Amino acid sequence: MLAPLEDRSILERDDAAGELADLRRALRESRIRLRRGAWQSARQICALNAEIRRLRNERDDCRQRLEQLASGVAIVELGQALMRLSANNERLSAAARRVWQLEKNLEAAHAECARIAGERDSLLRTQQPPAPRESLP
């Protein structure tokens, strides 16, 4: 059964208004999703740009280090450092040998001092006259 003609237009308007509200709601949700996606994409782009900058800096540092190695500067610097360390090591070894020699001389001097003190004490004991004994009345 069909509704009377007047009522049919009201129903059609209600259907059209409901459909229009549904379309507006769908449009609003779509815009929200698009904004959210745009923000996520913008954040991802910023992160990727930062990573690109970091990798370029690392590449430049590696390139500079490689150029130094290729030019021989690093080898020369290492050679100079080795020469300095070798000279320092030689001085340290010489000082250690000198300390060892001085310790041996000191030990010998202590031994000689002890021997001389022993001789002195021995001579003092042999040269001292015996203590006088007290006479008895």
Image: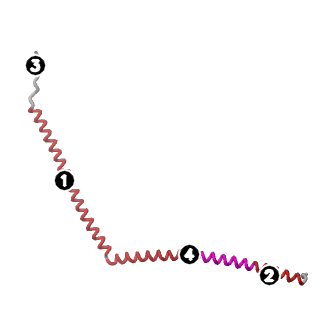
Q: Nearer the viewer, mark 1 or mark 2?
A: 2
**Residue 30 image position (x, y, % from top left):** 68, 78
Disc sitting over residue 101 in the figure:
1
Mark 3 to mark 1 CA distance (whole Å): 59 Å
Earlier sequence position, callout 3 versus callout 2: 2
Badge 3 is on which residue? Answer: 135
Q: Position of residue 35 (x, y in %)?
A: 63, 77
The image shows residue 81 at horizontal and vertical percentages of 29, 68
The local crowd at label 2, few if under 14, some if 14 to 19, many if 20 or more residues have their Cα within 10 Å, is: few
Residue 44: give its label: 4
Looking at the picture, tell me which residue is in the foreground, 115 or 44: 44
Contact between labelled residues 1 and 3, with CB atoms less than 8 Å apart? no
Residue shown at 32% from the left, 78% from the top: 71
Nearer to us of marks 4 and 3 is 4
In three-dimensional space, the C-alpha distance between marks 4 and 1, rounded to whole angstroms, equals: 73 Å
**Relative to residue 51, is residue 137 depicted above or below?**
above
Q: Which residues are magenta?
A: 22-44
> What is the secondary structure assignment of the residue under circle 2?
helix
Q: Residue at x 37, y 76 (%)?
A: 66
Q: Nearer the viewer, residue 13 or 97?
A: 13
Q: How far is mark 2 from mark 4, CA to CA?
A: 41 Å
Residue extending furthest toward the top: 137
Task: Choose mark 4 or mark 1, whichever is in front.
Answer: 4
Earlier sequence position, callout 1 versus callout 2: 2
Front-most of residues 24 and 58: 24
